Amino acid sequence: MSKLHKTKEKEVFYYFLKSGKKRFMYRHLYYDLLGKRRERKKSGFKSLEEAQRELIKLKASMLDNNQLQTDKHDLNVSQWIDIWYQTYSSDWAVSTREARKNTIEKHIKRLIGNIKLKDITKTIYINRFLNVLKEEGFKPHSTNSMHATISTALNAAVEDDILDRNRIRSAPIEKPKRLTNFLTPYELNIFLRYAKRERISDYTLISLLAYTGMRSGEALGMHWSDIDFKGNTVSIKRTRDVLGTRKPKTDNSIRTIKVDGLVFQQLKKYRAWCMQRKLECGEQLADDDYIFLNNDGSMYYYKELLSIAIRRIYRNIKKEKIKINTITGHGLRHTHCTILLSEGNQVKTVADRLGNTPETIFETYSHSFEELEEQAVHSFSQSLQSVAESVAEK
């Protein structure tokens, strides 16, 4: 193209073809949603007025659709998911924000980030994302979580008219296997017996988790003021982990629950130990202190110490050739819930105690409901049989 010449219209220029004919073009500069400077241009107009009309149409189109009408075909998955994250992440819980950021940076961008958003199809998604995750050994639970992040981002693109629909919504996602991260009442008794041999901080935390079903982060976030020694209740008001202290996972998680007297006996013994450790450091134990200290009393207890203690418990159990199911710290929560359900407690009661919704209880602990159904069928049959035998004797 030959040299451009300015016209009275700021973004419209004219130039000459080799034949000597005069032509017009527009060059519209703007910043896209990622903050990058971009340009839209078109040439070949025979008159200034024609170029002006097309430029006005372009600007109107961009204003009507917040610049996305002209940008959307250029966005790839990485660019859109960055926009989505920056727009909505401030409304998410800290743990959700960190988990999604990790998924985006380590997996989504790595596997499908360079694909144009408009080109994402179910087949491409299965081949380039789901199948690769499976080959890399990711468990269904992790894959489900990553899929939820991508699908939520694409739903937002549909709502913003960037995509006509979410094409990965019906992608085949493998369901997590039947829950196994729990102990039977018999196994829990063995586990707690060996846990009692552990250091006082470890055993006290394990007892509290087993008898309340609270999340480990909720227990680590408790202050001494959250314990009512007279009423035998504990209040869950916050959670604590490597990301800091904050509100619990959901509004349902803020709760006050009754606790067995055995746990309170242990808490009283542990409180005396904490007071002694604090005094050795020249400090007084305060009501707003975190309950759980490291076993030497020098720092706050952190979650990895629980995992280490549980591994040590299982090593000791194995030495004596006793076999019980292997669980994680969160498995104590699953154990508490499973035992309550197996004893016929109402789902709403269990959900309130764990800080969950009944829907979550039904979804997570389906194995317990299957067993309860089998028990119900057996009980009904036994009841009818007893009546039939009674009638026959008469």
Image (cartoon, grey):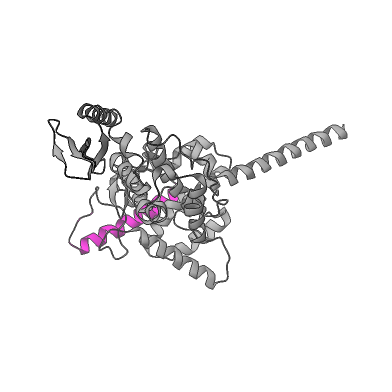
Counting from the top left corner in percent of width and height, residue 91 is at 30, 38
Magenta segment: 260-285
Counting from the top left corner in percent of width and height, residue 197 is at 44, 66
Counting from the top left corner in percent of width and height, residue 23 is at 22, 35
Numbered label tally: 0
Depth check: give the residue in front, 186 or 135: 135
Q: Is residue 94 visible?
A: yes
Counting from the top left corner in percent of width and height, residue 308 is at 40, 65
Q: Is residue 71 above or below residue 194?
A: above
Q: Residue furthest front?
A: 19
Work out which quarter of the rendered image holds the C terminus and state it.
top right
Question: Is residue 264 found inside the magenta-colored segment of the image?
Answer: yes
When asked about the image quadrant of residue 266, the answer is bottom left
**Magenta segment, prevailing SS (helix, strand or loop):** helix
When asked about the image quadrant of residue 59, the answer is top left
Depth check: give the residue in front, 197 or 325: 325
Work out which quarter of the rendered image holds the N terminus and state it.
top left
Identify the residue shown where x is 43% and y is 34%. 164
